[in-house]
Amino acid sequence: MTTKLLKNLAAAMLLLAVQDAWAQRYNQLITNPPLLKSASGNFTITAHDSSHNFYPSQTTPSAIGGDTLLFNKPIPTMAYNQATYLGPTMVWQGGQMLNLSSVNRINGQSTTIHWHGLNLPAHLDGGPQEPIEKNGGTFNTSFNVIDPTQTCWYHSHLMDSTTYQVIKGLAGMILVEQPTDPLISMLPHHYDTNDFPIVIQDKGFTFGPKTGNVCVVNGLDTAGGGSIHTPGNGPYTLVNGVLNGYLKVPKGLVRLRLLNGSYRKTFQVVVGNKYNTPTAYEPLYLIATDGGFTAIPHAIDSIIIGPGERYEILIDFSLKNNSDTVYLNNRSSSLPAAGPPGTTTPGYVTGGFINKNAFMAFVVDTSIHPATPGIKPVTLKPYAIDTTNVSYRLKVLGNDSTIGGKIGTWTINGDTMNMDSINDIIQVNSKEIWSIKNTTNVYHPFHIHKVQFQVIDMRDTTGAIVYNSFYNGTLPKNWLGYKDDVLVPPYRTVRFVASFDSFPSPEINPMYAFMYHCHILTHEDNSMMQQFVVVDTVQIKAGIRKLSQKGNFILYPNPAGDVLNLKGSSTSAGTLRITDILGRTLREEKVMPFNGILPVNIADLPRGMVFVEWNSGNTHFIQKILLK
Ligand SMILES: [Cu+2]
């Protein structure tokens, strides 16, 4: 053989070796979070500092993006209970009275544990209003599980620090099971055998100084910037806290409970035949959305899942052979664009990074025989929220670089999150249609606590109902079901209807507030989040409301006739809002910085008791005024 031929052969073999190295990277068995059940309904969830190895099976450093990276090393994390990352999968029985103890053993940091997707009393839902003291604080709750069979989750919701704590690992899954639900026994439900939690998370790592030419991992990138992840072409995508993992699945029907627990990324999930650039996709059957079962199993080949969303899908492996392998992948690095105002051309908004390699692999193992194989039912659960007799609210998602001196602050109705302010008062057992209007050029996964809503439609900036070509002219199938989180495209308005049932709060007070917010955690922390209370008519009529004020303002006269005067000063632009006692917005206007008296013409407003609210980045004011 000539030297040249040898060199070519060597090069070819090296290429093969590199490709095989990629394929063989899916060599880390994914250990699923343990199930946590309690016949008595007593649960203790303890948040703690930990350390976790995200890729213990990595035998040699990987050449990625021009660097040689070693991930095989425990790095600092946070977790719940015995886990070193994430927490156990809890099973809550419908109708059960839960006694839930949340314990914080994190050194030097408060936390909260929010029960995402569940309907429970406001002061027990683990939002920012319920911090658990650092170094051993405990928060005990007790409530009755009234939710249907559904896959929910729990995670840190600490004010301004949710990004940090969720990236560190503070999240877990909750399976709500109604004991009388016949679908439970029909569907695959043998946890870890034919029913798998799939927690997908984008993750950036930090690396220590180079040893030789190898960069050794030394921590999680908790900055959440999304663009700087060096070295390497991260962020990486983990499943259940494992990098390059695989799961063994039976030759039969398998149920995946997908949860996008990312701090930022949206994925178009597919199951394909190759780890890189698949050429064929497994048919998927969507059986549940955030709030439980869909009406029928929807045949799909991919599903767009934004941060916070859950979808349950079935895959049929019954025609596969032993060792056949398919890959969970991100089909596209981009999401369908709605197009900026004035354009109709469908385009794509780049999702920020291209992940051409699979998140994980599924390997068929014919020796696995689940006790409960499950069938694919023809019908599941009908759903519909009656839209008669509803009230309406508008939430405008925006971005304002002038507020609070922060560059690019994310806003709702021109305002930032204020823990002392109640943005909406909602009557218990009432139905409302909310319009979520996205005025920015990025997708926002809009999440609301307490309720499961039903999407009605999506409109463009002219008000026309529009589903661009990506959606085949109709609502996407993953919107046909109960949801608590919907991905609102740029320059689009998504409307949903929700019924705010059960658990009225005893008082109109921010301590009884539920949140609604963007579930991109960096947006939530900065500060696309607001609060609502749900109370009965007695509370609303009494108008009991904790009034708060930051800055010197006087509102007069009271009662008022045609003109109201706001006296004070604000160095930044803000929003003046007038709402009725049900929290419905009667008037909202943006006000430039002012000093002195700001007259507001109110001659056209209906008469009665109203709340007048001023909000800017650093001043806040709310007062009850009678219009006569
Ligand atoms: Cu957002």
Image (cartoon, grey):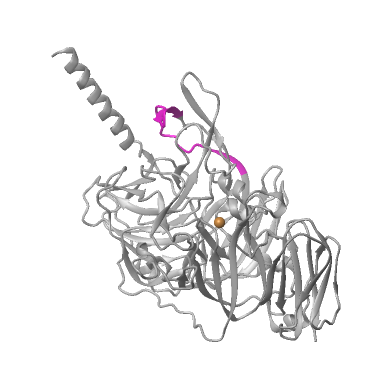
- Counting from the top left corner in percent of width and height, residue 293 is at 41, 70
Depth check, front residue: 153 or 367? 153
Q: Residue at x 13, y 14 (%)?
A: 1
Q: Find ligand 1 in the image and state its quadrant.
A: bottom right
In this view, which residue lies farthest toward the left?
1
Placement of 70 over or under 418, stated as above or below: above
Is 570 or 182 nearer to us in this picture?
Answer: 570
- Asked if residue 590 lies left or right of residue 146, the reply is right
- Identified at 38% across, 71% down, the residue is 183
Specify whether 597 is left or right of 122: right
The quarter in which the C terminus is drawn is: bottom right
Instruction: Reply yes or no: does residue 67 show up in magenta.
Output: yes
> Percent from the top left, x then y, of residue 202?
48, 46
Q: Can residue 132 be seen in this view?
A: no
Residue 551 in the image: x percent, y percent? 83, 60
Residue 349 lies, with reference to residue 208, above or below; the image says below
Q: Can residue 58 be seen in this view?
A: yes
* Residue at 69% across, 55% down: 403
Inspect the magenta stretch and tell me whether residue 116 lies in it. no
Q: Give the range drawn in magenta.
A: 49-69
The answer to which quarter of the image holds residue 613 is bottom right
**Observer-nearest residue: 144 or 119?**
119
